[in-house]
Image (cartoon, rainbow, N blue to C red):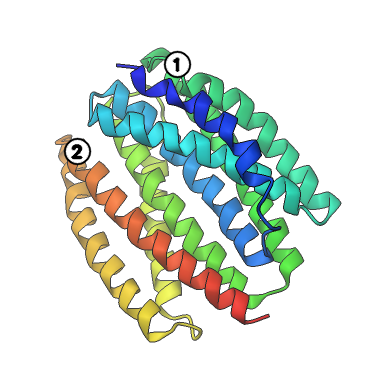
Amino acid sequence: MFRFLLPTSLLLGLLAGSLSCQAAISDAEAVNRAGMQRMLSQRIAKNYLMIGTDTRVDLAGTQLDSSIASIEENAQLLNDYAPSESIRKALNEANQTWGQYRQIALTRPDRAQSAELLRLAERFLGQSEALVQEIERHSGNQAARLVNRSGRQRMLSQRIAMLYLAMSWKLPEQRLRGDFDAAVAEFERGLEELQKAPQNTEQISRQLEQIDTQWRFARAGFSLADDSRFVPTVIVTTSDSLLRKIEQLTLDYERLAGSAR
């Protein structure tokens, strides 16, 4: 079952050579990349729980490999970008946690160990959030706030699925339901905020309409959890569809932020 872990070392070994030729990233891309770390913190935990609950295991393995490689790539790009001491400090703290988190994420999923995995995922999420905020403050670009907000929606799509899987696996964590409800509520607030943004182009407004439609479909699946009728495959599929749409939205906001400077 764990054959999908083997290519990761090869992928990571290629990063140093491939990234050395790339130009320094912009402030807007740095916000996006740091925001992507938030999302990946939740996506990796989701993949771990997918394997543990026997939910689309092959997909989980592929996503786990690519997510780990993406975190390593983003960390190197952000390290090369870091223009201030506060940003470098925030990045170093996140990277230290990532080393511990990665080690557990690559082990065989185990219910007893899942509490430590979720704790590290939460810490890495918080540290990545602090990094995003530092970069946004440094940029001084109002449009960068939309990149941040959209990127946080991207994270929430994976956090909601991760917490749903944790509840379906009946992990002995008291806060799971409360955290799940809070993530759902925050996603709805964030979507409403983005829909009202005066900077939205016609294309971005259309994308937000599509995301809203997909979100309403996801909410219908969440209601089944109230009766302990979990549908993890449906929620995983829907969350990935949401992620793809929000990923494109975030890139569009990144371009908008780049043109605003």
Query: Which one is in front in this view, the residue at disc 1 or the one at disc 2?
Result: 1
Q: Is residue 56 left or right of residue 153?
A: left
Q: Nearer the viewer, residue 241 or 117?
A: 241
Q: Is residue 127 left or right of residue 222?
A: right
Residue that sits furthest to the right in the current view? 85
Position of residue 168 measured from the top left corner of the image (x, y, whole percent) = 25, 30
Q: Does any portion of residue 133 appear in the rendered image?
A: yes
Q: Nearer the viewer, residue 3 or 13?
A: 13
Few, some or many residues within 10 Å of mark 2 (<14, 14–19, 20+): some
Which residue in the protein does label 2 denote? Answer: 233
Which quarter of the rendered picture does the N terminus lie within? top left
If you read the primary sequence from the N terminus, does the residue marked by circle 1 or circle 2 appear first? 1
Position of residue 22 measured from the top left corner of the image (x, y, whole percent) = 65, 53
Q: Is residue 228 above or below residue 85?
A: above
Helix, strand or loop for disc 2:
helix
Helix, strand or loop for disc 1:
loop
Which residue in the protein does label 1 denote? Answer: 107
Mark 2: which amino acid? Thr
